[in-house]
Image: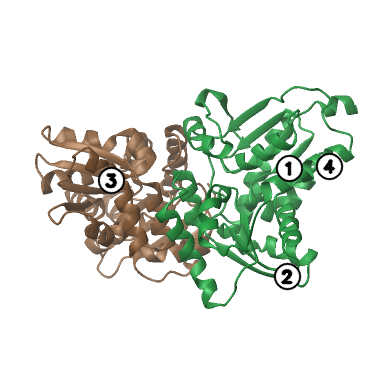
Chain colours: A green, B brown
Amino acid sequence: MNASHTRRLPIGVFDSGVGGLTVLRALREALPHEDLVYLGDTARLPYGTKSPASISRYAGQATAKLLDRGIKLLVVACNTASAVALQALQDQMDPVPVIGVVEPGASAAVEARPAGRHLVLATEATVRYGAYRQAILRRDDRAQVRELACELMVSLAEEGWTEGKIAEAIIRRYLEPLADLAFEPDSIILGCTHFPLLRPAIRRVVEEGTAIVDSASTTAGVAAALLAGDDLLNKQQGQGRLQLMATDGAGRFARVGGRFIGEDLDASDIELVDL
Amino acid sequence: MNASHTRRLPIGVFDSGVGGLTVLRALREALPHEDLVYLGDTARLPYGTKSPASISRYAGQATAKLLDRGIKLLVVACNTASAVALQALQDQMDPVPVIGVVEPGASAAVEARPAGRHLVLATEATVRYGAYRQAILRRDDRAQVRELACELMVSLAEEGWTEGKIAEAIIRRYLEPLADLAFEPDSIILGCTHFPLLRPAIRRVVEEGTAIVDSASTTAGVAAALLAGDDLLNKQQGQGRLQLMATDGAGRFARVGGRFIGEDLDASDIELVDL
């Protein structure tokens, strides 16, 4: 396969569901000329409460589908899959490069608050795996890290109840134990693709000086730098095409996904694929 | 297979996750001498947001596992699977009888409030399928039925935040549109296995005269009557054995499931099975 062919291939974006559309949105903004193909494994979401073995198996099956379609780069938009299965996916996709969201998120937090106290809000599986903690401490050994599983915030974002008293009360309740531990975070890392939707509510609950870090734009920046470095940017001008695939429930994908991508989606735009 | 052999077989209980343990608990109380084998399809939960085709396929695979083990009756504790796939499961399991939770729940509501206004709280898939509505109207053509998808209440129950201000605020918010419609329910049907845990919070939010109906005990009564009618009750005395199986995450099953069954569970008590 020659380089000019590879340049015209789309970027693959994989997530367990619709949450990764927040990352896709950042990729479109950073790389408007690139074609994008997104696969949400909606038949088997959520990954966040599953075992590492299941997460790795499901992620491997889903990304194989993207590889079959032909992609020049895989972005694992799912924090849980990035935390648990990134190395396995890199081995499987080789020589196609694979980027997860955990390392870019950790970089952004460390840059925003050197030697800081970082609080990672994430799913159960991401917390159990401690991937953010490791990624932060590898970059900054003076950092302190706490990780908090916030499953109810995932449902809040899916239901669209992202602002108001209920959202703020739930966020406050998750943060309560930290006050008892006298852990006042300098940065809050949104370690789940659903949580950027809750950013305004989180902002109202936490101290003004606390940085809120989300990995979507940082990941898009890493993707752009990687493609530029390998001379794989699409030279074609014009808006890149977008292809959306899901493993189940096109109607729900369109309805809930629209909130994440920030535009109306129609069920007929979503291709259902069987893994 | 002779009748005395069949009598000694366990009752199979199937659910998408741990919620069906509320039904298992009612079965143990109604039928203390019976052996019970429970399978929670935790690798693929939740069913409530999936498409009918996926729900039927997953439920079929899971219940085939119970059939292989040998059971004398299958109780489909999952409201979503009962609503979407009961007939298919009955065909598949024949001649083993299959009971769902929707029909017993509808019976209980109609008996509690004849010619009443019934509000069904359930998952998205159960609501979309309208199974409770049909089951109620088949029994009572003067009844009025409204169905409400309450996904966030599932997460509340899983997180264990079943009482207090957050739980009540979420329930109130789901019920708000009904006030605008001037639909004052005579009965509220807990159309998801997770919702019995929220019963006290629901009680505090709704009018005193509103009946709160859950299908767990009614379903156990139907199971007992069916086994007695077919002369399939276990004649052995003593406490029946309980076997718990899950398709993923024994640790989480034990931790969250303990709240549903009402006793502490240990991860080593849960057998992991592959479908």
On screen, residue A76 versus residue B134, left or right, reads right
Are tags 1 and 4 found on a single chain?
yes
Q: Position of residue B155 (x, y in %)?
A: 42, 54
* Kind of residue indicated by mark 2: Ala
Q: Spatial distance from mark 1 to mark 2, Cα to Cα?
A: 25 Å
Query: Tag 2, which secondary structure?
Result: loop
* Kind of residue indicated by mark 4: Leu
Q: Can you identify the residue that label 4 sits on? A: A226
Residue at image location 56% in from the left, 52% down from the top:
A199
Tell me the mark number nearer the camera, choosing from 4 and 3: 3
Q: Position of residue B35 (x, y in %)?
A: 33, 61
Residue B194 seen from this side: no
Q: Position of residue B265 (x, y in %)?
A: 43, 69
Q: Spatial distance from mark 1 to mark 4, Cα to Cα?
A: 10 Å
Q: Spatial distance from mark 4 to mark 2, Cα to Cα?
A: 27 Å
* Kind of residue indicated by mark 1: Ala
| Contact (Cβ within 8 Å) of mark 4 with mark 3 | no
> Which quadrant holds residue B60?
top left
Q: Spatial distance from mark 4 to mark 3, Cα to Cα?
A: 50 Å
| Contact (Cβ within 8 Å) of mark 4 with mark 2 | no
> Which quadrant holds residue A238?
top right
Q: Residues within 10 Å of mark 4 (few under 14, many from 20)?
A: some
Q: Spatial distance from mark 3 to mark 2, Cα to Cα?
A: 45 Å
Q: In the rendered structure, find residue B176 and report the number of the disc placed on it.
A: 3
Q: Can you identify the residue that label 2 sits on? A: A143
| Contact (Cβ within 8 Å) of mark 1 with mark 2 | no
Whichever of labels 1 and 2 marks the residue nearer the N terminus, that label is: 2
Q: In this rendering, is residue A254 above or below B113?
A: above
Chain label for disc 1: A
Chain label for disc 3: B
Q: Can you identify the residue that label 1 sits on? A: A220
